[in-house]
Amino acid sequence: MSAPLSLLRLPRLSPLARRGGLIVILGALGLSLLAALPYAWHASLSDQASARRAELALLKEKVRARAEARGPALGADDPVETMFLPGTTPGTTLAAFQSLVSEAAAASGLSVLRLQPLPTDEVEGLSPYRLAVDAAGGLAEVQSFLVDVEAMLPIVIVTGFDIQPHSAEAPAGQQPYPSEELAISLRLEAYAWRTAP
């Protein structure tokens, strides 16, 4: 009976042996965690990748549906001339451009302070016309004007935009910025098409 009990009894370990055993156990646990880490990382990446694939499929479907709803591009029967500024000479073309911008500003409620033609390259074929516009108005008028300009035919492109409070200086006794009026500086560009005379 005493022999089996002596077999069950473990030998007493020295402090150095206990410390070494603890280091071995901790090292084995650390290595097993390191071995499992790439699998956990891969699993999280695969979840993210499947979410991204679903998002991409949704975006592709939206783009495809929008392209189908938009209809065909310009065809041979479409009046391409309406995309360009009217006028037979550079002067009449620039006057037409200024008139279009003035009408759009008046329709949106903006007060045009200055329409300044900018240098342009007058060549045969496609010629750009540039215009600097200084105007004043409220935020709603600015928004309406920009929407009208970007949607009009002939095509007009806003190439520069600066907006500031109309005046930071107020008369004595009044607070600065007494109104919501804004000072707007725009640079617009449109194109004319002319063949050689």
Image (cartoon, rainbow, N blue to C red):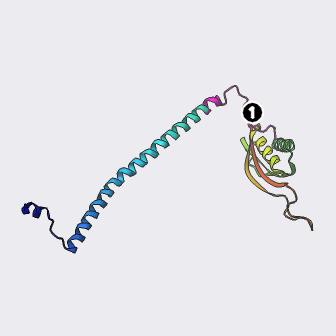
The residue lying toward the viewer, choosing from 145 and 97, is: 145
- Split into 4 quadrants, where in the image is the C terminus? top right
Q: At which x and y percent is residue 176? A: 86, 63
The residue at the far bottom in this view is: 15
> Is 57 located above or below residue 130 in the figure?
above
- Who's the residue at 13% across and 61% down the image? 8
Q: At which x and y percent is residue 136? A: 85, 52
- Who's the residue at 84% across and 43% down the image? 108
> Is 23 located above or below residue 83 in the figure?
below
Provide the major secondary structure of the magenta segment: loop
The residue lying toward the viewer, choosing from 89 and 115, is: 115
> Is 5 located above or below residue 140 in the figure?
below
Instruction: Please state the extent of the stretch shown in magenta in the rendering.
Output: 66-89
- Who's the residue at 87% across and 43% down the image? 106
The residue lying toward the viewer, choosing from 100 and 19, is: 19
Q: At which x and y percent is residue 173? A: 92, 67
In screen coordinates, is 99 left or right of 76? right
Decide if residue 192 is in sight here.
Answer: no
Task: Sort mark 1 into few (<14), some (14-19) or many (20+) by Cα contacts within 10 Å.
Answer: few
- Split into 4 quadrants, where in the image is the N terminus? bottom left
- Who's the residue at 84% across and 63% down the image? 168
**Which residue bears the numbered disc 1?**
81
Residue 29 part of the magenta segment: no
The residue at the far top in this view is: 77
Q: Which amino acid type is shown beneath numbered disc 1?
A: Glu
Decide if residue 169 is in sight here.
Answer: yes
Q: At which x and y percent is residue 195? A: 73, 36
